[in-house]
Image (spheres, rainbow, N blue to C red):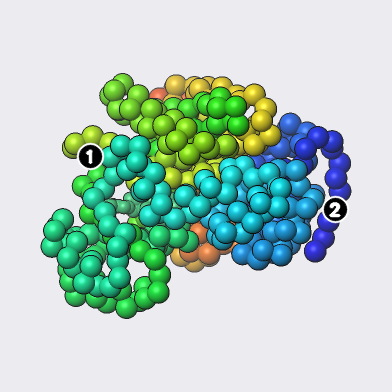
């Protein structure tokens, strides 16, 4: 347990979790002169490496959460690996949580997310959360068609809790592997493109909605995000309205990401995250106010900032760990030669497929911005060569 400097005045925001999302939120806090404390699992966590005020402890431990909460005025979180019952306990003890424990209880569980969306009349894939065994999955597949998608109700990320199942045999095998886990089973959706919309909302109800982005997912991992998404004005407006509606219905405080699928029949809501999100990293350089700054403003009940784009087009490419464990830092010089490349490296140990950083490019032309972001990220991942001069 190490408690360091408390340099600035004002309310202290405590973030449970110290990965790259906390790291970038912390950076936004520096600009505003805020006091931001972190609860890190280890001192090597991405944000713990750079923050002045870090406590180490497990986000799964009520004792660690209580100890941490005692030194913070407002508590927020950067991941879902927390028991919502613990958050309810903290709230009952008088701590201020933003978003609150009720929102966490909903968004930490994909089955509960669906309940909210259905209640709000939002379109979602056909699904069932009544999954006792393989028979229920097979019955769903026979009713809605194969393949289908089985998802862990909680704890999944970067596609790790998402399984596409082709037939009854595969369903039976998977259910053996996932025995004891809470599951959501849903129809496989023929996705034309994937979108996300970020919303920031204050306790007063003030709410801003960011321009809709398109996300490029491969194997369940986000590779690229760009905006404007090539959409009709109607779909853009619908996506934004859905984001706002979800935030309002949950009385959300903080930022919210709503992931959507574009299908031949229109938009379908996939999932929610009530925290800064990978589909909002481009907002650091690409929007008037970043998602990280607006999250802090929202949880401290400060006026929200403009969400609009600062350029015609913004593209973000993730830097994912290469198979050979190459450290992206080694290619920093090469990546910085790419015109307009804003490089973010998270200081994480390189492991295959792990999110180690991202690159954002703001430009006049979407294709050009995407190409430059991909090139710089590719150099950092070792999948692209430096271009001959
Ligand atoms: N019903 C579906 N039909 C087709 N593809 C799907 C479906 N559900 C999810 N996918 C694909 O799998 C990806 C990951 O799914 P989902 O967003 O539910 O998982 P996750 O691991 O929680 O994601 P994240 O990393 O965003 O938290 C989606 O972005 C999409 O590409
Ligand atoms: Mg997702």
Q: Residue at x 19, y 75 (%)?
A: 169
- Vertical position of residue 212 compared to residue 258: above or below: above
Tell me where residue 232 sits by quadrant: top left
Tell me where residue 46 sits by quadrant: bottom right
- Vertical position of residue 154 compared to residue 71: above or below: below
Q: Label 2 CB, ligand 1: below 8 Å?
A: no
| Viewer-closest of 270 and 63 | 63
| Viewer-closest of 348 and 138 | 138
| Viewer-closest of 237 and 74 | 74
Q: Residue at x 64, y 45 (%)?
A: 97
Which structural element holds mark 1?
strand
Judge whether residue 212 can be spotted in this image: no
- For the N terminus, the quadrant is bottom right
Q: Residue at x 48, y 46 (%)?
A: 273
| Viewer-closest of 38 and 67 | 67
Give the residue at mark 2: 4
Whether residue 286 sits left or right of residue 158 in the image: it is right
Judge whether residue 89 can be spotted in this image: yes
Crowd rating for badge 2 (residues with CA inside 10 Å; few <14, some 14–19, many 20+): few
Marks 2 and 1, Cα distance to the nearest angstrom?
Answer: 50 Å
Tell me where residue 24 sits by quadrant: top right
- Vertical position of residue 345 compared to residue 179: above or below: above
Residue 153 rendering spot, x and y as whole percentages: 40, 60
Label 1 near label 2: C-beta < 8 Å?
A: no
Choose the circle earlier in sequence order: 2 or 1.
2
Give the residue at mark 1: 263
């Amino acid at each position: 347990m190490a408690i360091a400097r408390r340099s600035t005045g004002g309310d202290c925001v405590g973030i449970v979790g110290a990965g790259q999302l906390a790291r970038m939120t912390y950076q936004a806090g520096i600009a505003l002169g805020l006091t931001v404390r972190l609860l890190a699992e280890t001192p090597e966590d991405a944000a713990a490496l750079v923050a002045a005020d870090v406590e180490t402890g497990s986000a799964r431990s009520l004792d660690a959460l209580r100890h941490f909460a005692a030194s913070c005025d407002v508590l927020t979180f950067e991941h879902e690996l927390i028991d919502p019952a613990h958050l309810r306990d903290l709230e009952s003890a008088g701590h201020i949580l933003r978003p609150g424990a009720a929102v966490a209880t909903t968004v930490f569980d994909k089955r509960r997310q669906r309940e909210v969306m259905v209640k709000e009349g939002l379109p979602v894939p056909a699904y069932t959360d009544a999954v006792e065994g393989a028979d229920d999955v097979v019955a769903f597949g026979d009713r809605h068609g194969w393949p289908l998608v089985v998802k862990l109700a909680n704890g999944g990320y970067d596609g790790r809790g998402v399984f596409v199942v082709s037939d009854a045999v595969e369903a039976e095998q998977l259910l053996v592997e996932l025995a004891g886990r809470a599951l959501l089973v849903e129809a496989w959706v023929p996705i034309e493109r994937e979108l996300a919309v970020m919303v920031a909302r204050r306790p007063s109800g003030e709410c801003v909605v960011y321009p809709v982005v398109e996300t490029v997912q491969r194997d369940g991992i986000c590779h690229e995000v760009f905006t404007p998404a090539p959409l009709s004005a109607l779909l853009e407006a619908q996506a934004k309205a859905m984001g706002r509606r979800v935030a309002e219905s949950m009385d959300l405080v903080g930022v919210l990401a709503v992931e959507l699928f574009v299908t031949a029949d229109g938009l379908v809501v996939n999932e929610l995250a009530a925290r800064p999100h990978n589909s909002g990293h481009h907002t650091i350089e690409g929007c008037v106010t970043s998602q990280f700054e607006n999250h802090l403003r929202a949880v401290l009940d400060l006026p929200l900032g403009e969400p609009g784009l600062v350029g015609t087009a913004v593209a973000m490419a993730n830097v994912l760990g290469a198979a050979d464990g190459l450290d992206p830092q080694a290619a920093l010089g090469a990546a910085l030669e790419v015109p307009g490349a804003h490089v973010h490296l998270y200081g994480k140990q390189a492991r295959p497929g792990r999110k180690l950083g991202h690159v954002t490019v703001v430009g006049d032309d979407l294709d050009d911005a995407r190409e430059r972001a991909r090139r710089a990220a590719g150099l950092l991942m070792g999948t692209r060569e430096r271009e001959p001069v």
